[in-house]
Amino acid sequence: MSGIQIKDLSFAYEAGGKLILKDINTEIGEGEFVCILGQSGCGKSTLLRLLAGLETATTGEILSDDVAIGEPSLNKGVVFQDYGLFPWMSAGENILLALKQRYPKRDKKELKEIAVNMIKAVGLDESIYKKLPKELSGGMKQRCAIAQAFSLDPPILLMDEPFGALDAVTRARLQNLVRELWTRDEKKKTVFFVTHDVDEALLLANRILVLGQSPSHIIYDVKITEELHPTRDTLFENIDMMKLRITLINQINKDVTTHI
Ligand SMILES: Nc1ncnc2c1ncn2[C@@H]1O[C@H](COP(=O)(O)OP(=O)(O)OP(=O)(O)O)[C@@H](O)[C@H]1O
Ligand SMILES: [Mg+2]
């Protein structure tokens, strides 16, 4: 069970301070891959932090299958833009640490095997296991962060511009990887993926939300059925997708002049 219900959510960082989010109401179904778009500063990361339990709603509530989403937990994997690996541990130890929290009763050898398999599954050589994060490229670190998130196997995965700092080729590879990892699970993870890249959203999501200007609420909400779902090769050939692309860009830029 891993749907998310957001009810009348408003949020300010300080009591009585400026509202960043206002009147957010939506339901994210179990297994939906939701991308959230919006201009810089509109509150995308704030909303993700609320879903992660790293911030608390000022008013309203966030439920996961009727229970308050509450504290950060192993039910929710989070991948941030800055990788989130401990710098003093090797890549493998970082993944192992997460696995030990998730499966405290399993023996270390078995968990190490899972960690090595995940490192391979994200297209890295197993020698990466022993490398410190500082010895890895940005793309490799981000692959490790994805390996860590997926080896925890959380029903809810929250990703905040995880590919924002990567070059276009690595970014495209990792987009394919995340989509593949999500697709291969019979019981799909519920994914909430923040991006400001419309094409990334079209390639990954089966639902796209747009946040307006702050105090933000959801100004656009569209589902993309599996039959319509574009691939990298078909994205720019598909008329419906191109129309949607223009609509999304217009929605994101809607009231830009009043906020510059
Ligand atoms: N810890 C904080 N304390 C106070 N204000 C904050 C804090 N973090 C963010 N803000 C403010 O909240 C608003 C929304 O920020 P947020 O980081 O959620 O935007 P965003 O949509 O993720 O932007 P970007 O696309 O640039 O990452 C901004 O005005 C920002 O200045
Ligand atoms: Mg952000």
Image (spheres, rainbow, N blue to C red):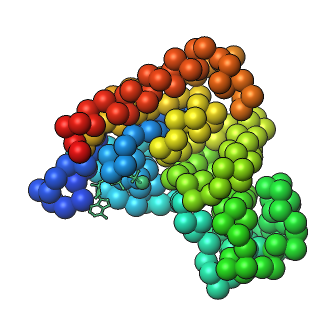
Return the residue found at the far left: 16
Relative to 191, is 254 above or below? above
At horizontal 52% and vertical 41% (from top left) the residue drawn is 197
**Residue at the extreme bottom of the image, as rendered:** 88
When asked about the image quadrant of residue 14, the answer is: bottom left
Q: Is residue 61 above or below residue 163?
A: above
Q: Position of residue 186 (x, y in %)?
A: 76, 35
Q: Quadrant of the N terminus?
A: top right
Q: Quadrant of residue 231?
A: top right
Residue beneath the point at 68% across and 76% down: 133
The quadrant of the image that shows the C terminus is top left
43 with respect to 82 (left or right) = left
Q: Is residue 169 visible?
A: yes
Q: Nearer the viewer, residue 207 or 187?
A: 207
Can see residue 174?
Answer: no
* Above/below status of 70 relative to 67: below
Residue 205 is left or right of residue 97, and the answer is left
Q: Identify the residue shown where x is 50% and y is 45%.
A: 195
In the shown orientation, is residue 111 left or right of residue 153? Answer: right
Q: Report the number of discs.
A: 0
Image spot of residue 86 (x, y percent): 61, 77
**Residue displayed at 51% across by 25% down:** 245
Q: Position of residue 204 (x, y in %)?
A: 63, 36
**Quarter containing ligand 1?**
bottom left
Report x, y in % for residue 147: 72, 59
Closest to the observer, 102 or 230: 230
